[in-house]
Image (spheres, helix red, strand yellow):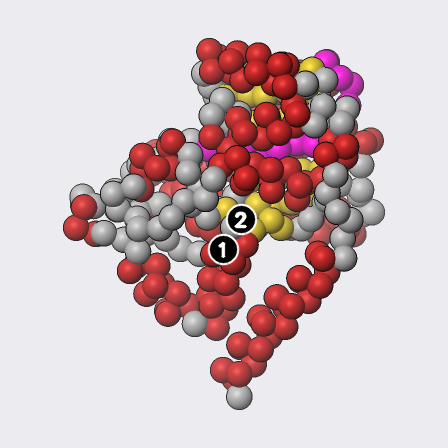
Amino acid sequence: MDLLQKILVPLIGLILAFWFYSGKEDFKPEMLKGKHVIVTGASSGIGEQMAYHLAHMGSHILITARTESRLQKVVARCLEMGAASAMYINGSMEDMMFAQSVVKKALELWGNLDMLILNHIGTSDFHYFDRDIAHVQKLLDINFLSYVAMTTAALPMLKNSGGSIVVVSSMAGKVGFPFVAPYSATKFALDGFFSSLRQEFVMRNTNISITLCILGLINTENAMKAVSEVYASSAAPKEECALEIIKGGALRQREVYYKYTPTKIPLLIRDWAPDLLDYFIRLKYNVGKQED
């Protein structure tokens, strides 16, 4: 009976979630026309693709990353694609002052903000945990604390606009995967912080939505370079992933799963058979090609 309940409850939850979201408003690109949006980690990968989608929809865009030359190219293309405006500010999110300065730049440029898309991550090698605490601290600063710093700075503008916070996370923030312990820790932290903050917004009648994006393996250059020889799984296209993230934020969804089935089903298995899920995850790894 206990096992049956463990299976039925998640299944019923999945059905209810599908019913709930299917009744939501359909996405229309016009929703983003003229909106003011910050996108972090936008010099490459998913962030770059989000900038292009937003440009095509006619948004005002402020992008940020470390490498200025790449940001300049992204901004130029965004303007060609029809962005209402496109600007950049470069720096490292390891510096909390820089993280806050991005939001201050938006205030100076626009005076308001409709959507804050937090997408940046620090570099992390794909290997067994090597007891490097300094690296864990650095990743926590970049992947977690800078998200908190930017959110804190953006709250006054988002309250005024009834805006949205979009947090790009990962399956590694819901389930333990080998070889990414420091990275996974930062993604679990995002889930805890922003899920709690969402509750507080509801309790205080604060009209700001929080969308947590749970992503599987995406075919970004950095991800493919890190896992191609070790992790046996097909990667989803970054262009489509970027669009799904934007849609979820515009529709003020609680969570976005991309791709849906490969990310959502494992979480249902986790709830009633965590050891089985761990076993299936380990099967996807070629441990022989991984160094100690």
Q: Which residues are magenta?
A: 108-121
Residue 258 to residue 107: above or below: below
> Which quadrant of the structure image shows residue 58?
top right
Q: Does any portion of residue 278 appear in the rendered image? A: yes
The structure residue drawn at horizontal position 73% and vertical position 43%, both measured from the top left corner, is: 27
Q: Does any portion of residue 37 appear in the rendered image? A: no
**What is the secondary structure assignment of the residue under circle 2?**
strand
In this rendered view, identify the residue nearer to me: 6 or 157.
6
Question: Mark 2 highlights which residue?
Answer: 258
Q: Is residue 182 left or right of residue 154?
A: left
Residue 267 to residue 258: above or below: below
In this rendered view, identify the residue nearer to me: 133 or 10.
10
Question: Which mark is on residue 79?
Answer: none
The structure residue drawn at horizontal position 52% and vertical position 50%, both measured from the top left corner, is: 259
Query: The residue under label 1 is which amino acid type?
Result: Thr
> Which quadrant of the structure image shows residue 249?
top right
Question: Which mark is on residue 263?
Answer: 1
**What is the secondary structure assignment of the residue under circle 1?**
helix
Q: Name the image quarter holding the C terminus.
A: top left
The structure residue drawn at horizontal position 80% and vertical position 42%, both measured from the top left corner, is: 207
Give the class, few, some or many, for how many residues have Cα within 10 Å of label 1's Cα (few <14, many ≥20).
some
Q: Is residue 29 left or right of residue 219?
A: right
In this rendered view, identify the residue nearer to me: 25 or 205.
25
Measured as percent of width and height from the top left, residue 253 is found at 69, 48
Measured as percent of width and height from the top left, residue 244 is found at 60, 42
- Labelled pair 1, 2 in contact (Cβ < 8 Å): yes
